[in-house]
Image: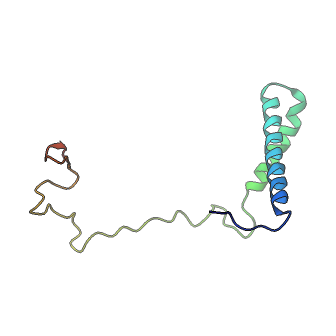
Amino acid sequence: MPGPRVRKGENARLRARHAMIHNAAKTLQNIMFDGAAGKTEAYGPALRVLELTQDAMQPAKDEQKGGSSGPIMPRFELGPSGAAPQATPENDQPLGTIVDAEGNVYMEA
């Protein structure tokens, strides 16, 4: 299946953008690695990277300080009786029991 159609020169632009982001990330990693290795000339740039990262991660003025309103919890609804379904007459094993083709029980619920 062919990929999406792109305009002439767009692939080169996308590759250049990807390379720029990759190189920037690698540069930041190298600054932090040098600081961790004890190179004192890397301490200043490393602290600056941490400061800029901390500033970028702060919520904007129009955002809530605690993040979003909270996690979106899933809503599971039980059946009409609110209880788990019972075993059917053709299957006398309770739900969750693992049985092979011959009827041997491997694990009971």
Residue 51 drawn at (x, y percent): 81, 47
Which residue is at the front of the view, 67 or 39? 39
Q: Residue 73 location, x and y as percent?
A: 46, 64
Percent of width and height locating residue 68: 61, 65
The total number of labels drawn is: 0
Q: Residue 107 appears at what percent x and percent y?
A: 20, 43
Q: Residue furthest top?
A: 38
Name the colour scheme: rainbow
Q: Residue at x 88, y 27 (%)?
A: 40
Q: Is residue 100 above or below residue 73?
A: above
Is residue 82 shown above or below 93? Answer: below
Looking at the image, residue 66 lies above or below residue 43: below
Residue at horizontal 79 percent and vertical 25 percent from the top: 37
Q: Quadrant of the N terminus?
A: bottom right
- In the displayed image of the protein, which residue is found farthest to the right? 41
Residue name at image x 78 percent, y 31 percent: 33
- Residue drawn at the location 87% of the way across and 39% of the way down: 45
Say left or right for 101 vs 32: left
Q: Quadrant of residue 91?
A: bottom left
Q: Nearer the viewer, residue 20 or 70?
A: 20
Left/right placement of residue 20 relative to residue 3 reads: right
In the displayed orientation, state which residue is furthest to the bottom. Answer: 80
